[in-house]
Structure formats: structure tokens, C-alpha cells
Amino acid sequence: MSENSLAAGSSITHIVKALGEPLFKAGDNVRISAAIALALLALSAAFFAFGQPIPEGKLPQPKLVIMDKSLNADQAQKAVHAARLFYAFWNTGDPQFARLALATNFTDGTLPKGRPQGVDGPLFASSNFRHAVPDLRCDVEQLIVAGDRVVAHLHFSGHFNGAFGQKQGAGQTIDFIATDILRVQDGRITDNWHLEDNLTLMQQLGIVQP
């Protein structure tokens, strides 16, 4: 049985039985490859997020998922899906993904100066960043899911072919990492505490000298 053959809406329990392996080992958190993790979390060829079909190919696939064994199937499934929707937004710039991922009362716990609070904040940040780096890509290196939190290790890349403030890019390579701590409730992200390697980014943009 391939990962792509799993039916939408299948539960983790059903998938585990189909794979013929226990999901958890007593006393351990689960460390599993992305392909198996996504299979266990019932990620199929077509996702349904709040009644709307989302093609699987549009959602970034984490390279590694580390799962808290105490989570029930529904909570785990919703947490990972909300995170993948959010990072599909950062990977594509498409605001529909942010609106599907974020709760209406979303709060940025590490709000940068000049960025609006709430759902408009990530939309504002993504638009400005893509003005500088039009081909921005966001890869999810790993997700750590525990309780109502999802910790994401992210890798951003692209080329500075646009403008950042008064500075015009000349195709410089952009390559830096970031970490998010997301709080997920009822399948939506209500809070984010984030940290980016801004020094590396500013050096690559030519704003700060190495």
C-alpha cells in the first residue's frame, strides 16, 4: 500500500492497522520519516480543509515529523495540517493558505516593528519579502508536534532579484533558516512565536557587511 493510496478522512488508527505496525512505543516519542508520517496522518491526494479541497501537491512535505505519543488522532492530524497550510502560504505567497491556516484571533507573539498584528501580519510580511525575493521558497526541515504546539524548523531560499527598501537586488542567493513555535487550537493556528536568522539575511541582501 503506497502513501498516496490512502483515502481522505482515514484515521491514524486505520492507517496503522493497514501498515501492520504499532504507531507508538511505550515511553518514547515517535521519530518517523516524512513519508510515513504523512501517511499516518491521513494526508492523501486531496486534502479537505474546512470544506475546501486542497491538492496535496500544493502543501510542503516536512522532511521529518516527531510526534508526541499522547496526542489523539484528530488533534495530531489537525496540527500537522494547519502547519502545512501555513508553510504552503510562505512557500507560494498565496494568501488563501494563510487564511485557511490562521485563526481569526491569530496573535504574533514576536511581532516585528512595523508589522500589523493578526492575520494581516503574515500577509504583509510575505508580500514585502516577495517584493525583494520573488522566487522565495520555504522548505520544512522538521516538525515537532507536542500538546497544542508545533515547532517548525524552516529553510528559506531564493534570489534577491527585486528591491528591499531603496536597495535593488542583483540576483544574490538568499539562504537562511527560521524557527516557529505555533499554537494550534481546533485546527487553526492561534499564536506564533518566531525567530529568523536575520543577520544572515541582511548580509545576503547587502544591508549589513559580513
Image (cartoon, helix red, strand yellow):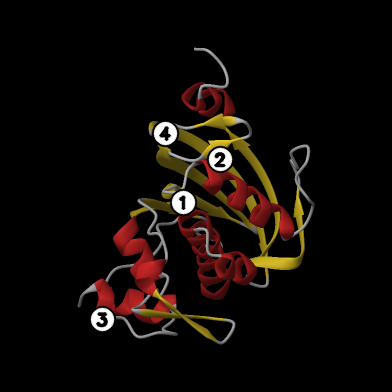
Residue projecting furthest to the left: 1
Which quadrant would the N terminus be assigned to in this image? Answer: bottom left
Q: Of label 1 and label 4, which has the lower sequence position? A: 1
Alpha carbon separation for disc pair 4 and 3: 35 Å
Find out whether the residues at labels 1 and 4 contact each other: C-beta distance under 8 Å: no
- Type of amino acid at the residue the image marks with label 3: Ser
Mark 4 lies on residue: 175
Alpha carbon separation for disc pair 2 and 1: 21 Å
The mark tally for this picture is 4
Q: Nearer the viewer, residue 190 or 210?
A: 210
Query: Residue sitting at 56 percent across and 40 percent down?
Result: 179
Q: Residues within 10 Å of mark 1 (few under 14, many from 20)?
A: some
Q: Of label 2 and label 1, which has the lower sequence position? A: 1
Q: Mark 2 or mark 1: which is in front?
A: 2
Where residue 158 appears, x then y in whole percent? 40, 41
Find out whether the residues at labels 4 and 3 contact each other: C-beta distance under 8 Å: no
Mark 3 lies on residue: 5
Q: Residues within 10 Å of mark 3 (few under 14, many from 20)?
A: few
Tag 2, which secondary structure? strand
Q: Mark 2 or mark 3: which is in front?
A: 2
Alpha carbon separation for disc pair 3 and 1: 26 Å
- Specify whether 100 is left or right of 157: right
Query: Residue sitting at 51 percent across and 57 percent down?
Result: 87
Mark 1 lies on residue: 29
Q: Residues within 10 Å of mark 2 (few under 14, many from 20)?
A: some
Q: Residues within 10 Å of mark 4 (few under 14, many from 20)?
A: some
Q: Mark 4 or mark 3: which is in front?
A: 4
- Type of amino acid at the residue the image marks with label 2: Thr
